[in-house]
Amino acid sequence: MGNTPPVVALIHATPASVAPAHAAFAADFADARLWNLLDDHLISEAEAAGGLTADLHQRMHTLLRYAVNGGADAILLTCSMYGPAARDFAPDATIPVLASDQALFDEVDRLAAQRITVLGPVRTGVDDTVARLREHLSTDPAITGSVIDGARAATTARDHQALERAVVDATLSAQAGADLILLGQFSISPAQPAAQRAVTVPVLSPPQLAAQRLRRHFTGATA
């Protein structure tokens, strides 16, 4: 990593992802210098269009190029729906470019769970995560997706207690049919510790795994 801390550009599609991303890096890669880029219309426009359109895909590529040209040493998207844009951009980039859930999906593949439940705040995002996870895995587990009642309202209101209650309730409902539970979006990841305490199956969320992935890249650490 050298004497200069790496600059990690965080590209956000909602303000609700900023704090969870920063918390993950504070815990797992505190030496990184974080640079926030926000286009807060990206999610609403993708939801209105029913998914990622060609125009939105290119808009994300514009942000990715801006981060590269601005001196970022790595880029992490914090919106799961824009993962395909990161995946398409990464091969030609000279720096690491990670989709929000790339490290999460790799960990799911490593764990090889047979029954996976994806939880998220909105149906569009849940369905998108489930579809991309199926494509990513080397095995063929049963994957289901559920929307967490009240999660979006709680994140919008920045009501952490309400978010925890909503996520814990959804996790408790999911555990009987799952070997592994995923909190699919950065915005609900602050409730991961409470959700994990409530159930015996593993509960994973993307920010921590992404921060750990980048720390290993820059420091050579193996854990």
Image: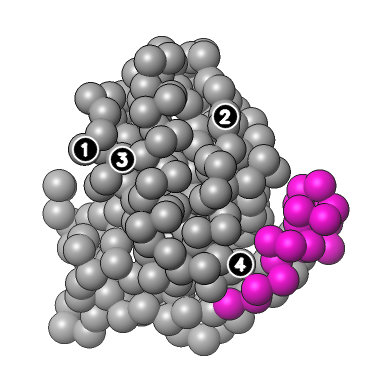
Which residue is denoted by mark 2 in the rendering? 145
* Left or right of residue 65, residue 195 in this image: left
Residue 219 image-quadrant placement: bottom left
Tell me if I can see residue 129 in this picture: no
Mark 3 or mark 4, which has the lower sequence index? Answer: 4
Counting residues from the N terminus, which is met first, the one under dot 1 or under dot 4? 4
At x 27%, y 75%, the residue is 32
Residue at x 76%, y 56% (from the top left corner): 46
Helix, strand or loop under label 3: helix
Q: Which mark is residue 13?
A: 4
Q: Residue under circle 3?
A: 195
Q: Kindly state the secondary structure of the residue where label 2 is placed.
A: strand
The residue that disc 1 covers is 197
Measured in 3D between alpha carbons, the distance from the residue under mark 1 to the one under mark 3, in whole angstroms, is 5 Å
Amino acid type, label 3: Ala
Left of 25 or right of it: where is 116? Answer: right
Task: Report if residue 45 lies within the magenta region.
Answer: yes
Contact? badges 2 and 1 (CB < 8 Å) = no
Q: Read off the magenta span.
A: 38-56
- The answer to whether the residue labelled 1 contacts the one labelled 3, judged by CB atoms less than 8 Å apart, is yes
Q: Residue at x 42, y 43 (%)?
A: 167
Mark 4 crowdedness (10 Å alpha carbons): few <14, some 14-19, many ≥20: many
